[in-house]
Image (cartoon, rainbow, N blue to C red):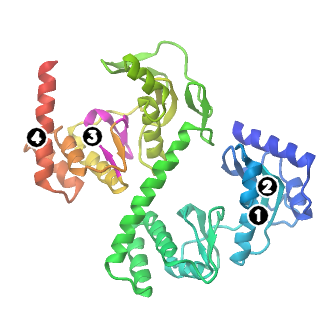
């Protein structure tokens, strides 16, 4: 169990010991919780636990959510909004899910419990989303991990903290937004039939399906970029410190380390299984940039690497941002060569499909492992800003013009505008030749 989980549970036990739940069911479930329960989700503001059947009073598995926000003005928030534990219970009852219980013990502490629902294979997404929409449900913060299929083929939303319930059914715009969000995370072979059938049933035009899929992918990329800012504050993975942020459990190793690279704008030093990259930005402007997370090169790189971590792309694991230093995990893999250009082109294609660009796509920024390319340096990642022909041209410029390696790279990427990519590749080759001549 992590340090954050222990801290949250100690704090919750103290609160519940001083003021136990009035509900006998919640009190019995809490008292039956093991000393070190299974933690499903964790943050400084919420803890989600699983109570196994062998410990519960009724011999059923239960899910418990503890809401303990550490925000200022929580009493004022409760005056203008319903507590999240009570919102969860109201949402479950609106969907006809029985057996749940909730209680708000204080302005900054709530408890919600419901019977455990095992995950089952997916069914008909279109029919079940339509059923939920007819019941008035919609969710502006929808993602697939918050939806569960039951044994009888029903789709159940698990997180109702942001759900909305509209009498008479969800509005058309909300239905489209939910369809787009689900389709963006499904594989293409499942997303396209879902949208085609939904558009047919709703009597929408044929272009609506492609528009919804494009919008959903854009919204998903934007949502992940917004969520990646969690690495700059206290969360389940990172902790805020005076000089920046640290991944929980990581401390910068002492000593001098082994210098891997040193230049005018920075240096890279390895300390065992960790790598430190120091950004050298002299002058008053550089000092100001180091103090502001949005402008600090180290903070920005930490966020970009964490974005890749959230999106599922192979990259060096971000460990910390401290002042003008970025710490990442060491990658003990060989650096990419010309023979690996087709794999790098495929990586770049997937990155573009996720809505992100990479303006510094070059061999030195990649390592090659058994699972494919691993990005070592995310300084050139451009979230939400796509220039695919420029990025592909930068990668193709690593190979000689007209060579078989360049042709394989362009073929592996897939459909593209050859004229635009070739123009960018020629431009980058001139820049690389000029840089080599000046060295």
In the drawing, does residue 63 fall left or right of residue 226?
right
Q: Which mark is residue 110?
A: 2
Quadrant location of the N terminus in the rendered image: top right
**Residue under numbered circle 3:** 361
> Badges 2 and 4: C-beta atoms under 8 Å apart?
no
Residue 365, by quadrant, is: top left
Callouts 2 and 1 close, C-beta under 8 Å: yes
Residue at 36% in and 76% down? 208
3D distance between C-alphas at marks 1 and 4: 61 Å
The range drawn in magenta is 356-379
**Is residue 180 placed above or below 63 in the rendered structure?**
below
Residue 370 highlighted magenta (yes or no): yes
338 in relation to 176, above or below: above
Q: Residue 250, position in %: x, y?
A: 59, 29
Residue 132 sits in which quadrant?
Answer: bottom right
Q: How many marks?
A: 4
Residue 49 seen in the current view: no
Q: Is residue 264 visible?
A: yes
Distance between mark 2 and mark 1 Cα atoms: 8 Å
Please give the residue where the numbered disc 1 appears in the rendered image: 86
């Amino acid at each position: 169990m992590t340090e954050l989980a222990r801290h949250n549970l100690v704090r919750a036990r103290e609160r519940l010991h001083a003021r136990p739940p009035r509900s006998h069911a919640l009190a019995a479930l809490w008292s039956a919780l093991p000393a070190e329960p299974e933690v499903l989700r964790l943050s400084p503001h919420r803890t989600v636990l699983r109570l196994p059947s062998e410990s519960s009073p009724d011999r059923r598995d239960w899910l418990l959510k503890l809401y303990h926000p550490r925000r200022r003005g929580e009493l004022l928030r409760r005056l203008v909004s319903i507590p999240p534990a009570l919102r969860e219970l109201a949402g479950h009852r609106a969907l006809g899910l029985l057996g749940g219980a909730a209680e708000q013990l204080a302005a900054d502490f709530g408890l919600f419990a419901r019977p455990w629902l095992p995950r089952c294979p997916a069914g008909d997404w279109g029919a079940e989303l339509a059923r939920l929409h007819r019941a008035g449900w919609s969710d502006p913060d929808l993602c697939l991990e918050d939806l569960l299929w039951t044994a009888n083929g029903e789709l159940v939303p698990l997180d109702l903290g942001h759900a909305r319930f509209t009498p008479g059914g969800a509005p058309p715009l909300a239905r489209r937004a939910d369809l787009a969000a689900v389709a963006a995370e499904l594989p293409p072979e499942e997303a396209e039939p879902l949208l085609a059938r939904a558009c047919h049933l709703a009597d929408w035009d044929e272009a609506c399906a492609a528009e919804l899929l494009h919008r959903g992918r854009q919204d998903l990329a934007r949502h992940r970029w917004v969520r990646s800012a969690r690495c700059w504050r206290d969360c389940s993975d990172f902790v805020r410190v005076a000089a920046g942020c640290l991944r929980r459990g990581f401390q910068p190793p002492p000593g001098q380390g082994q210098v891997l690279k040193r230049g005018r704008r920075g240096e890279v030093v390895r300390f065992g299984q960790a790598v430190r990259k120091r950004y050298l930005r002299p002058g008053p402007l550089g000092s100001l940039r180091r103090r502001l997370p949005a402008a600090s090169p180290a903070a920005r790189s930490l966020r970009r690497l964490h974005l890749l971590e959230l999106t599922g792309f192979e990259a060096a694991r971000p460990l910390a941002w401290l002042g003008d230093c970025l710490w990442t995990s060491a990658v003990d893999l060989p650096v990419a060569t010309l023979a690996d250009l087709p794999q790098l082109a495929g990586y770049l294609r997937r990155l573009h499909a996720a809505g992100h660009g990479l303006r510094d796509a070059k061999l030195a920024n990649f390592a090659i492992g058994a699972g494919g390319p691993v990005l070592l340096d995310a300084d050139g990642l451009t979230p939400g800003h796509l220039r695919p022909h420029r990025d592909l041209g930068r990668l193709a410029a690593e190979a000689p013009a007209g060579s078989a390696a360049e042709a394989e790279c362009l073929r592996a990427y897939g459909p593209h505008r050859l004229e635009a990519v070739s123009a960018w590749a020629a431009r980058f080759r001139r820049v690389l030749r000029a840089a080599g001549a000046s060295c």
